[in-house]
Amino acid sequence: MSIRQRFITAVLLSFLLVIIFPLYLNAEDDLKKADELYNKGGLENYKEAITIYLKALENSPNSYAANWKCARAYRDYADEAMIENLPDWKEICAEYGKLGMKYAEKAISIDSKKVDAYYYYGISLGVYSTGVGKIKAIKEGLKDKLIKNMETAYEIDKKYMDGGPPIVLGRFWAQVPWPFRDKDKALKYFRDYQSITKYNIAPDIRRIYIGELLIELGGDDNKKEAKELLELAAQSKRKYYKDMANSLLSKLK
C-alpha cells in the first residue's frame, strides 16, 4: 500500500470514528430511552417515545430497529386513542396508522428477513382502516398489502407477539367486508393461534375477537366456548374491552 493510500485510509477511519460512530451511539442511546417510555404505555409515553424514535432516525436513518419501533409507537398511540375514545380518534388512527405503515415499510426495505416490520405494517394498516373505514382502505388497494405483509410475518414467525400473526389474519378474514369475508379461514387462524398461545399478550381483545366469530358461526359448542371466552374478557380492567365483551354476551342470552 502506497503512502497516499495509507493517508486516504487513515482519513476515512478518522471520519468514521469522529463523525459516524458518535451518531450511531447517540441513536442507540435514543432507542433505549424511547423503549423505556414505550414500555410504560399510555398516550403521553407513546407520544414522547415517538419524538425520541424520530430523533434516533435523524442520527441513523437506516436503523432497522428505529424504523420498526417508530411504526409500533405510532400504531399503538392510535390504538390507545381509540380505546380512550379521544374526540378525534378517527383522525388520529388515519394519520398515525399511515405513518406506522411508512416506517414499517422503510424497515422492510432495510431488512426483509425479520418479522417485526411486516407485523407492524399489517397492524398499522389495520388501525388506519379503522380511521378511514374498511371500504375506503379496500379501494386504496390496502387489503392485499395487509394479507401480503401479515402472511409474511406468519411465515417468518407465527409465534411473534405471542401468536400475533394468526390472530391478526383471523380477525381480518372475520371482519373484511363481503364478498371477501371468509369465516372458515378466520376460524382456522384463530385455532392456530389458540394452539400456540396462553393469551399472555392483550388477552381481553383476543378473546373478544374469537368469541365474536364463534357467535356468528353459531351452534351449541361454539356458543358455549364463546361464552367462556367473553366472560373472561368481561373481567377486563379496561372499560372498552369490558363493554365489548358484555355487549357480545348479551347476544347469547
Image (spheres, helix red, strand yellow):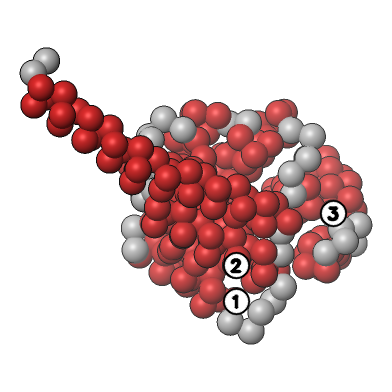
Front residue of 75 and 110: 110
Q: Earlier in the sequence, mark 3 or mark 1?
A: 1
* Residue, disc 1: 89
* Residue, disc 2: 47
Q: Is residue 209 visible?
A: no
Q: Position of residue 245 (x, y in %)?
A: 82, 60
Mark 2 falls on what kind of element? helix
Crowding at mark 3 (Cα within 10 Å: few <14, some 14-19, many 20+): many
Kind of residue sitting beneath label 3: Ala
Mark 1 falls on what kind of element? helix
Q: Position of residue 107 (x, y in %)?
A: 40, 45
Residue drawn at (8%, 18%) of the image:
2
- Tell whether 227 sits left or right of 18: right
Front residue of 96 and 18: 18
Residue drawn at (40%, 61%) of the image:
138
- Tell whether 105 sits left or right of 42: left
Q: Earlier in the sequence, mark 3 or mark 2?
A: 2
Depth check, mark 3 against mark 1: the one in front is 1
Depth check, mark 2 against mark 1: the one in front is 2
Q: Earlier in the sequence, mark 2 or mark 1?
A: 2
- Tell whether 197 sits left or right of 147: right
Q: CA distance from mark 2 to mark 1?
A: 14 Å
* Residue, disc 3: 233
